[in-house]
Image (cartoon, helix red, strand yellow):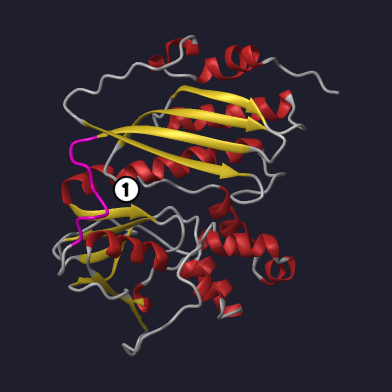
């Protein structure tokens, strides 16, 4: 059996070196936070091996993805990070080497995004590796899902569908082999390592009526936002931003367009804002908020409705 750290050693040797000042050296049962003149935003996401990532993925990339999906939620609320709590349930086959690589990736991103580790917990589990992160942020104005108004424009912060297509390529080697190496690497990279749009947090806080990150697919997450706001929407599918790599994949298999629109893991931001709003590129306008409580409409280039088999990824 490989040599392993004790629980106390995991805290002291692996995670304390990457913890922020609010963590008090990870020597207490809680962290101390004091955001002045701001609203405190708290969010949590759980990632499970075999569901959100492949068990044999690079542990540093697993750590970064786990952190970034939580930072994406903060960004969508118009918040900038303060710190994060990490709960880690380790399966029977974990090793010190794996854990140290995980912590290195986590610490690197924590520094890059100013989101230091400030506490958490570890446990053993007979099940798969499970990672739960609670992220805390500050904002001048919280951006809810519930604020979309008829007449608002609908924007997305960047290309959609890349991560869902990257996952499809990992599951289908024959499909992956048909793409150029550049397109294949780009799409798989977008699945492995999302880019939280923290650069938009202040703009959203100042300008957005409603927002949420696109974690389960554009179509389904739009339906959630509309339901929370008590409105409907119309989306022009031709306006949906697709990367060159996504277009290459869809040209090979047109059915992948539905995957791009309904698949998850992009962590771009879905935004409702006044029609005069102007977001920095690559954000683009894709539709409008409408009155009523009908499901969102998805329209093709001829303004005819398009229907999908399912709107988004569902755990249950």
- Image coords of residue 235 (percent x, y): 31, 75
138 w.r.t. 215: above or below: above
Q: Which residue, given by chain and number where applicable, does mark 1 sit on? A: 76
> Is the N terminus in the top left, top right, bottom left or bottom right quadrant?
top right
> Residue, x 32% and y 74% (percent of image)?
295
- Image coords of residue 193 (percent x, y): 54, 47
> Residue, x 58% and y 72% (percent of image)?
249
Local crowd at mark 1 within 10 Å, few (<14), some, or many (≥20)?
Answer: many
Q: Nearer the viewer, residue 36 or 18?
A: 36
Please tell me whether the stretch drawn in magenta is mainly helix, strand or loop: loop
Magenta stretch holds residue 143 = yes
Image quadrant where residue 87 sits: top right
- Image coords of residue 293 (percent x, y): 24, 72
Magenta segment: 139-148
> Residue, x 28% and y 39% (percent of image)?
79
87 w.r.t. 244: above or below: above
Magenta stretch holds residue 241 = no
Q: Nearer the viewer, residue 203 or 148?
A: 148
Q: Is residue 149 left or right of residue 174?
A: left
> Is the C terminus in the top left, top right, bottom left or bottom right quadrant?
bottom right
């Amino acid at each position: 059996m490989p040599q392993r750290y004790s629980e106390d050693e995991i805290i002291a040797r692996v995670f304390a070196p990457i913890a922020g000042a609010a963590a008090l050296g990870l020597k207490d049962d809680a962290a101390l936070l004091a955001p002045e003149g701001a609203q405190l935003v708290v969010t949590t996401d759980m990632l499970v091996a075999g569901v959100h990532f492949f068990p044999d993925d690079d542990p540093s990339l697993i750590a970064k993805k786990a952190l970034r999906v939580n930072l994406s939620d903060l960004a969508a609320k118009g918040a900038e990070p303060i710190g994060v709590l990490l709960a880690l349930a380790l399966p029977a086959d974990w090793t010190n080497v794996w854990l140290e690589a995980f912590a290195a990736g986590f610490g690197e991103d924590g520094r890059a995004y100013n989101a230091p580790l400030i506490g958490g917990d570890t446990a053993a589990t007979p099940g798969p590796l499970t990672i739960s992160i609670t992220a805390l942020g500050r904002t001048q104005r919280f951006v809810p899902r519930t604020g979309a108004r008829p007449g608002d424009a609908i924007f997305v912060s960047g290309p959609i569908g890349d991560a869902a297509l990257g996952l499809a390529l990992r599951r289908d080697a024959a499909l992956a082999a048909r793409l150029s190496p550049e397109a294949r690497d780009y799409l798989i990279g977008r699945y492995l390592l999302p880019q939280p749009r923290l650069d938009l947090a202040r703009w959203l806080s100042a300008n957005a009526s409603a927002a949420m990150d696109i974690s389960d697919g554009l179509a389904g997450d739009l339906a959630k936002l509309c339901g929370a706001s008590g409105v409907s929407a119309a989306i022009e599918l031709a306006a949906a931003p697709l990367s060159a790599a996504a277009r290459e994949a869809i040209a090979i298999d047109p059915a992948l367009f539905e995957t791009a629109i309904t698949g998850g893991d992009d962590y771009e931001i879905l935004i409702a804002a006044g029609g005069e709003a102007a977001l920095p590129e690559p954000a683009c306008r894709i539709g409008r908020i409408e009155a009523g409580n009908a499901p969102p409409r998805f329209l093709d280039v001829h303004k005819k409705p398009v229907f999908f088999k399912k709107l988004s990824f569902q755990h249950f």
